[in-house]
Image (spheres, rainbow, N blue to C red):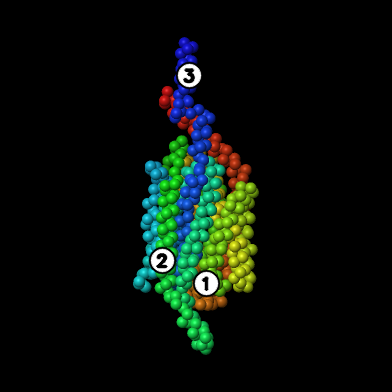
Amino acid sequence: MAKGEGSEQYSNASLLTKPGNCDGISIAKKSEQRNRLSICNKLCYAVGGAPYQITGCALGFFLQLYLLDVAQLDPFYASIILFVGRAWDAITDPTVGFLVSRSPWTRFGRMMPWIAISTPVAVISYFLIWYVPPFEDGKVIWYLFFYCLFQSLQTCFHVPYSALTMFISSEQKERDSATAYRMTVEVLGTVLGTAIQGQIVGMANAPCVPGPGEILANMSNSSVGLNGTDHVISLEHTRAAYMIASGVICLIYVLCAIVLFFGVREQKESSRPKSEPLSFFQGIKLVMGHGPYAKLVMVFLFTSLGFMLLEGNFALFCSYTLGFRNDFQNILLVIMLSATLTIPFWQWFLTKFGKKTAVYIGTLSAVPFMILVVVIKSNLIVTYIVSFAAGVSVAAAFLLPWSMLPDVVDDFQVQNPKANGHEALFYSFYVFFTKFASGVSLGISTLSLDFAGYISRGCNQPVEVDITLKVLVSAAPILLIIIGLIILYTYPIDEKRRQCNRKRLQEQRDETDSETDSTEFSNMI
């Protein structure tokens, strides 16, 4: 009898030590190894963020200038294209997030099929945005259609990619590290987008058209009149340069998508079953009903609106207000290079002093330079120095929102342990508000320029345009940043709560894993 019991105990113990059967310690070790990401995994994941930033940077810095001076659209119609395109883009984000959250699991994962399918059509539509059609009557419809189409397809790429953060690892530390890699590559993407678009287009800058007063001045000055023969770059050369730049960006887009698809493995959380599918409006209520998420979204809605006003109008500001028409692309490149170099600093800063403190310091550090750039007398060297310093704040604006979003999702999961599988909704609604802010900023700024009397391809602009540009790159962004930081004061997730959430989530996972392993062991017996 005793011998039989001993044999049974030995048999059960041997089951636990056989391959595929683990005790509590080995389960924990395997779980830890599964959740740990290699440097290669993090780099491949990070590369996937480059297409969004490269195309977004090119569109954000140059599309307004392109529509006004190259496609030669009326400022009113340009404002309609920019606002409607961004508004449409904003609407598609929660829609795609809703559809992604209901997507079934496939052999490639739940997020990856969206990324793979959307990429080919997205690059075609992006290329056609930068093509000037050979007709006048339908130009507005052309740009509006392809701009909206690209934004929709870009959403089908970016929303699943953003939500992928929660599925590459269940460890908060690994996700934060992967996010830092991602932010570094994304800022490099903005550098690349600025360099490709700016340098190629800068070599074939659209010639300006002198006003009536300038024509009279040129006629009275024969030496100036002779200089007119020096302009060998035509508007057609500029249009061709925009198309070449867009073709290069499309190629990079495809390569990055391939690296992401084959270099990242999406983890299936089999031990945490998904909740029942929600309707679209139930999803809105779910995510916006979580207080910390709503406050975080409002914070970055206002701060993003401020930075996007600066981004969307800085090229025009450099060209006309500062008078650096042939140097604005280099100034933009300095800002992006500075941001890239300081991403590691902000990653260290947020781990040392906390994410909330990093937002305050990083965002407020941009304010003095927004003031300086409009107060100081036009000087190219000083402008480069101010731009480099402003890039430090741009780095914080890139890194911190995406670093804080996983904390909000974790907080939601702690408070709602039975509500799983809704990560894409949180990311899609954040992107929705960010893009809505972008659409509002572009629409308002272009309309403001129209009211101020902006002259397409003008060598000089009215004084009202100069004043409007100063407000759009300085006063308005500063006000919006201050409002956002006031809301941040009420944001409840500090470092103590974040660590507490991490501990409680780990306990939930361990408990669920233990129950799952016990069930599997019982079934084997």
What residue sits right under mark 3 in the picture?
A: 10
1 and 2 marks in contact (CB < 8 Å): no
Q: Considering depth in this image, is 213 or 14 the residue closer to the camera? A: 14
User: Residue 284: x and y, percent?
Assistant: 47, 49
Q: Which mark is residue 326?
A: 1
Mark toward the start of the polypeptide (3 vs 2) = 3
Under circle 1, the secondary element is: loop
Q: With 484 as the anchor, is 30 left or right in this view? A: left
User: Residue 434: x and y, percent?
Assistant: 50, 57
Q: Considering depth in this image, is 309 or 459 the residue closer to the camera? A: 459
Under circle 2, the secondary element is: helix
User: Residue 56: x and y, percent?
Assistant: 47, 60
Identity, as a three-letter code, of the amino acid under mark 3: Tyr
Quadrant where the C terminus lies? top left
Q: Considering depth in this image, is 409 or 58 the residue closer to the camera? A: 58
Label 3: how many Cα within 10 Å (few below 14, some 14–19, many 20+):
few
Tell me the residue at 41%/44% (across/down): 109
Mark toward the start of the polypeptide (1 vs 3) = 3
Q: How far, Cα to Cα, is label 1 from label 2?
A: 19 Å
Q: How far, Cα to Cα, is label 1 from label 3?
A: 81 Å
Mark toward the start of the polypeptide (1 vs 2) = 2
Identity, as a three-letter code, of the amino acid under mark 1: Asn
Label 2: how many Cα within 10 Å (few below 14, some 14–19, many 20+):
many
Tell me the residue at 42%/48% (across/down): 261
